[in-house]
Image (spheres, helix red, strand yellow):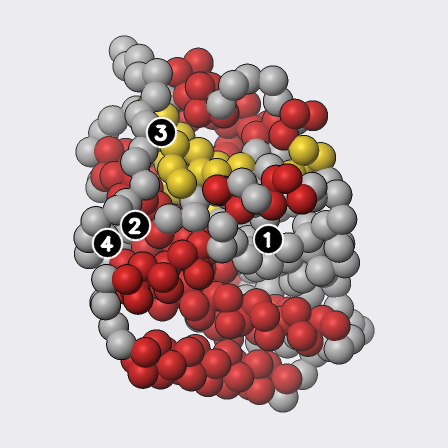
Amino acid sequence: MLQTAPRRKKSIASKAAPHERFLEAFRWMLLARTLEEKLVSLYRGGLITGGVYVGRGQEAVSVACGLFLQKGDIFAPLIRDQAGRSAFGEPLIDVTRTYLGSRQGPMRGRDGNIHRGRPRNNQLAMISHLGAMISVTVGALMAKRFRGEKNFVGLSCIGEGGMQTGSFHEGMNLAAVEQVPLVVVATNNHYAYSTPNEREFACHDLVDRAIGYGFEGCTVDGTDLTNCLDVIGSAVKRARAGRPPQLVVASILRLSGHGEHDDASYVTEEIKREPFARDCLKVAEQTIADLNLVDAETLREWRKDAAAQVDQAISTAQKEAAPEADEEAWYAISTRDLVDSLE
């Protein structure tokens, strides 16, 4: 029998001791920010074909999505989830190879630079019809259940714009009816490209939809790392323990344009002064300083280490060959050996 979801669980921003994995999460955030700043530089220098879409300001939500998943769990990140991807185990070289078109990357240099993934390692490759990723994740969870696997969860990320699509609603309904162990983390960054919230939905708060779907719902301050770790980590635990599917709605402001081609001139000065417009990385750094979690020299070493990792991944990818269109084996996610075995 379907359990009824509570109206809402209110989150409280952290004021005391940080989460036990705070510093670990901060380093993934720092690595993601460092990488994406470098990718922006390469894009502006004409070295990246296609778009660059960064998660500046979303790293605290993202890292919490990837950090609490275990081996065998399913992760469906989106374009602004580099921090979560890294925490889940995605190597930096996968990122740089994809952006720079190396044939040695996970998509073998043949796909857009944001659609990378390793499905066999349970990191799903996103499709641009973002709402449809909920159903994809639900399907992957049902397949694991059919195989008799135990103790797994799936986490799918979505933006508030993607929440307004028909495929999103279908996926949420299916997840609740089938009672799969799913966590949906929805990041309300207040603009679906240039469309503001008031032109996207009419409900008071997106988390109010949880009870209608048959989910349990809660909100989180997406600028507060400890709050993100507490709330999203707890949602993962509840899903793993057999509770109904979980909907977490985070509030932030996207601190860049939709992509690097977009100047975000539509964002009002008023909204930039809202509490949800804070930079989560700066907030985390201030927490570190206020609570004296590590000293300034350690922070400098962490920044140097992040920069060195990024530079190494980019240098490696830049030396590798791009695919040769007239010589490539244009299979989807298979290999020649697999195709031969099916013939």
Q: Is residue 78 above or below residue 215?
A: below
Q: Residue at x 49, y 59 (%)?
A: 82
Which of marks 3 and 4 precedes in the sequence? 4
Q: Amino acid at mark 4?
A: Pro
The answer to the question of whether label 2 and label 3 lie on touching residues, with beta carbons closer than 8 A, is: no
Residue 14: give x, y in percent of width and height: 28, 45
Q: Residues within 10 Å of mark 1 (few under 14, many from 20)?
A: some
The answer to the question of whether label 1 and label 4 lie on touching residues, with beta carbons closer than 8 A, is: no
The answer to the question of whether label 2 and label 1 lie on touching residues, with beta carbons closer than 8 A, is: no
In which quarter of the view is residue 261 placed?
bottom right
Q: Amino acid at mark 2?
A: Thr
The answer to the question of whether label 2 and label 4 lie on touching residues, with beta carbons closer than 8 A, is: yes
Task: Say which element carries label 4.
Answer: loop
Q: Amino acid at mark 1?
A: Leu
User: Which of the labelled discs sits on residue 189, or is there none?
Assistant: none
User: Which of the labelled discs sits on residue 18, or is there none?
Assistant: 4
Q: Residues within 10 Å of mark 2 (few under 14, many from 20)?
A: many
Q: CA distance from mark 2 to mark 3?
A: 15 Å
Q: Residue at x 32, y 41 (%)?
A: 13
Residue 199: give x, y in percent of width and height: 69, 25
Residue at which label 3 appears: 218
Q: Residue at x 48, y 66 (%)?
A: 32
Residue at which label 1 appears: 255
Residue 333 shows in this picture: no
Which label lies toward us, 2 or 3? 2
Q: CA distance from mark 2 to mark 4?
A: 6 Å
Q: Is residue 99 above or below residue 213?
A: below
